[in-house]
Amino acid sequence: MRKKSIWLVISLMLIAAFVFTACQPAPADEPADDTDAEEVIDEETEDETADQGGLQIPDIEEGKFNVAIVMLSTHDDGGWSQAQYDGITYLDEQMDDVHTAYLEMVAEGADSEQVFRALARKGFDLIFGGSFGYMDSMEVVAEEFPNIGFVHISGFKFNGENFGNMFGEMEVMKYVAGMIAGARAKADGATRVGGMATFPIPEEFRLFNAYALGVQETCPDCEVDIRWIFTWHDPIVEREGSDSLFDTGSHVVMTGADTPAPALAAADREGVYGITYDWVGSCTIDECLTAPYWVWGPVFERITKEVMAGTYPFTADYFDAVSGGVGIYGFEEGQELQPGVASLPQEDLDAIWAVVNAVDAGEFDRFDVFAGPIIDNLGNVVVPEGEFMTQADIDQFAPGAEGFEATYGMFWWNENIIADLPDL
């Protein structure tokens, strides 16, 4: 049964939260006036707070290891930041000797640099940066505070001392999502699926190329249309992008942004589907096929323990899907397949399950996703047969950073993608 009215309310709530929310209560269950991100600042950081647009920098808790995360959107955005909020809440619940805090709605660029510096001055021991655009800011502040740990999520810079980057094998889940999208389109006699990309960075190229490679596996005749929306979280823009893809013939639309816009747009049409992203709770209506999502809690716990023990390397920490840090909704323990997936032909379901089971067994990873031969949409050989991309290729545009060189890089579109490469 469709739940359009519920999702309309959720969509409006997301818009309101995005516009009006600045700093929400702490992840733990204590009253917000004495813990975490709503704590009143002291005089020492009053000038910093003014520079940060009114964001209040939380206090540390003496006698505990203090961990903070800085997030781009609201903690209840239904996507990327909500998954991170769940992760920091999990860490708080699992480790009694750890005190956690979070700040939300922190803009990339200069604003985030001020926030990271203020948290370091407060005395936080470990600071996570939850958006790609925080990378350069964290690098600067980490150099100023060599005794504090900084871990950037989704980037590629590190110093091997107190500043590292961390991400996970989401391209594997996106590949599976592509297999699902292709199978659904083929079963319904369609030949086009869509993808809504955020910014032209290596992360988005690898995730949508993985999606396209998955589509190619189950629907060789399908083409993939891509729209750039240039935002991580904007319910209105995401909905407009989804509608545009459906209007031009996409049968399934997958998003790289926060909100469940593709599923909401599909629910207002007949016979089409959306694929949501980031948060396990984002795929709840029949028109949603699945959601590749993040499970940050155990990842944050592992890193925190290693930092506390002095064993964390502060380099490139890219965890495998077999670790449980990522999932594909409907295929994980305790979940049920969404109706649009459960009704797929058994042959396609078997092929999808074969990949999921291989991932769980540690027999299929990101390097298998990007194994040659790979041909781009201009007819060029990207990866020759028998060759594999390296981590440097997956993370960057060629030629890559010094000491982390990329042979192939990620500035290309798979042969079934009908979009042009953007100007960088």
Image (cartoon, rainbow, N blue to C red):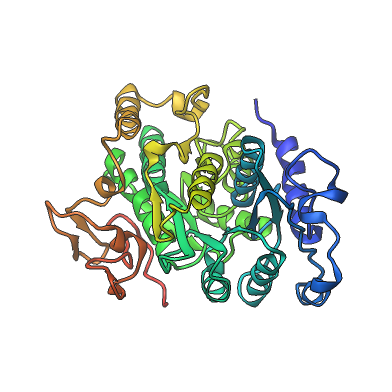
**Front one among 14 and 309:** 309
The N terminus - image quarter = top right
Which x, y percent locates residue 386? 12, 51
- Residue 310 as seen in the image, left or right of residue 172: right
The C terminus - image quarter = bottom left
Residue drawn at x 54%, y 44% is 296
**Front one among 205 and 62:** 62
Figure label count: 0
Which x, y percent locates residue 410? 32, 64
**Quarter-of-image position of residue 188:** top left
**Quarter-of-image position of residue 282:** top right
- Residue 407 as seen in the image, left or right of residue 258: left
**Front one among 359 and 219:** 359
| Residue 397 visible in the current orientation | yes
Q: Is residue 113 above or below residue 27?
A: below
Q: Is residue 11 above or below residue 356?
A: below
- Residue 85 as seen in the image, left or right of residue 381: right
Which x, y percent locates residue 387? 15, 55
**Front one among 84 and 47:** 47
| Residue 189 visible in the current orientation | no
In the rendered image, the residue lying farthest to the left is 386
Residue drawn at x 76%, y 52% is 36
**Quarter-of-image position of residue 285:** top right
Which x, y percent locates residue 337? 49, 25
